[in-house]
Amino acid sequence: MHSRRRFIQNLSIGLGAMAFSPFSLPASESSGLQTTGKQLRVALMGLGGYANIVARAMKECRLAKLTGIVTGTPSKIPVWKSNYGIPDKNVYNYQTVGEIAGNPDIDLVYITTPNSLHHQHVLQIAATGKHIICEKPLADNAQQAREMIAACKKAGVRFYVGYRLHFEPYTRELIRMRKAGEFGRIMHVNNYMGFRIGDPNQWRLKKSLAGGGAMMDVGVYALNGARYATGEEPVWVTAQETKTDPVKFAEVDETITFQLGFPSGALASCGTTYNFNNYERLYLIGEKGFGELSPAFGYGPIRGRTHLGAMNQPVVTHQTVQMDGLADCILNGTPDPDMTGEEGLKDMIVIDAVYESLRKGGAKILL
Ligand code: NDP
């Protein structure tokens, strides 16, 4: 049995793939991590498709280790125990997960449940005093995201959103070039991300579990990309929607285009869909040059070019470098990337504005 005594995580932290591409390098070959012998011990909550990807990628981690699981499906337990050497005492379900508070083998819970459960699961885990990574989209709306941030602050735990691209080398290089002024003043961004979704019965097509459709699921990549391509927060948002299959997409959005206006005058024109493939690109144009990532947002390999020619960055397993990178932040005090709960909230504010523009028409002013 686990002690129910509250475990003040931030005082005691850190004591302790599936390769998406055949070209993936282990994190050790692609980063300059400090290795002090400490590892961040992680429990995955919600053992679906993405949790499997993260777990396999973590086998290559040096600073993060999978030590626990939270699942509502008992039949998954023996498989995970045997694949990852998880002991019985580190296995929880959604009812017993509060007991994780007293488990010194777990420092952080990584929430990989459907979108609309993120809010309740983050509040539940914050109360245990464990650090949190929550998958994207952070919540159903900005209000929920604010409550999640407040709960984590109150509990004194670190709170991240799973924006894996912030550790991806092509993306990081593009951001570095933008910050260094190599593109000049950013004038325009054109980002899109979407795919043709399969099984009509999956939770992603149910509003009560998904919160929304393509915009929530993958439009958030185009949006987050517009924010890191410009380094600015939008001051107005407009959006348009089309629905060519009102039966399949009865509850959630199918295809949305949206535009963001930034304080500098830069404009972003973005799109997202659940109804066609080959729709994935980030393109920024500045006064001195351009940058393009295509593909830009999936597991890669990401490819890129700029006005200087083809980009040549290491190809990594995104989830390996993300988990090692965030462990480095927590264990060694390395500065946080733009993956904090607050960054997730900034995107939720814009997503709220996209839906409001669709409902009411016209522009939503965010000033
Ligand atoms: P899955 O449906 O494959 O897995 C979700 C898991 O959540 C289930 O297997 C189940 O695990 C658990 N769960 C708990 N309650 C429910 C419920 N009511 N209905 C369905 N599942 C439930 O989804 P994904 O893994 O694809 O997505 C999970 C999250 O990860 C989403 O927020 C998604 O946006 C995000 N994601 C992020 C990606 C990225 O690249 N950053 C890529 C893919 C997804 P159990 O049986 O163990 O309880």
Image: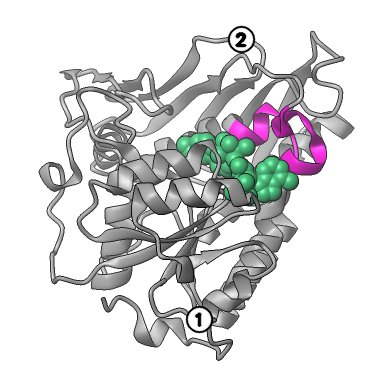
Which image quadrant is residue 56 in? top left
Q: For ligand 1, give the image quadrant.
A: top right
Work out which residue is located at the far bottom of the displayed protein and give it.
5
The residue located at (65%, 16%) in the rendering is 198
Q: For mark 2, does the 10 Å Cα neighbourhood hold few (<14), some (14 to 19), or many (20 or more) residues? A: few
Which quadrant does the N terminus fall into?
bottom right
Majority SS type along the magenta span: helix
Q: Is residue 303 above or below residue 235?
A: above
The amino acid marked with disc number 2 is Phe
Visual colour scheme: one colour
The x, y position of residue 168, in whole percent, is: 30, 38
The residue located at (29%, 31%) in the rendering is 19
**Residue 85 appears in the rendering:** yes
Q: Is residue 25 above or below residue 150?
A: above
Which image quadrant is residue 204 in? top right
**Residue 365 appears in the rendering:** no
Q: Which mark is residue 156?
A: 1
Q: Would residue 212 be counted in the magenta stretch?
A: yes
Q: Which mark is residue 276?
A: 2
Q: Which residues are the magenta region?
A: 202-217
Q: Secondary structure at mark 2?
A: loop
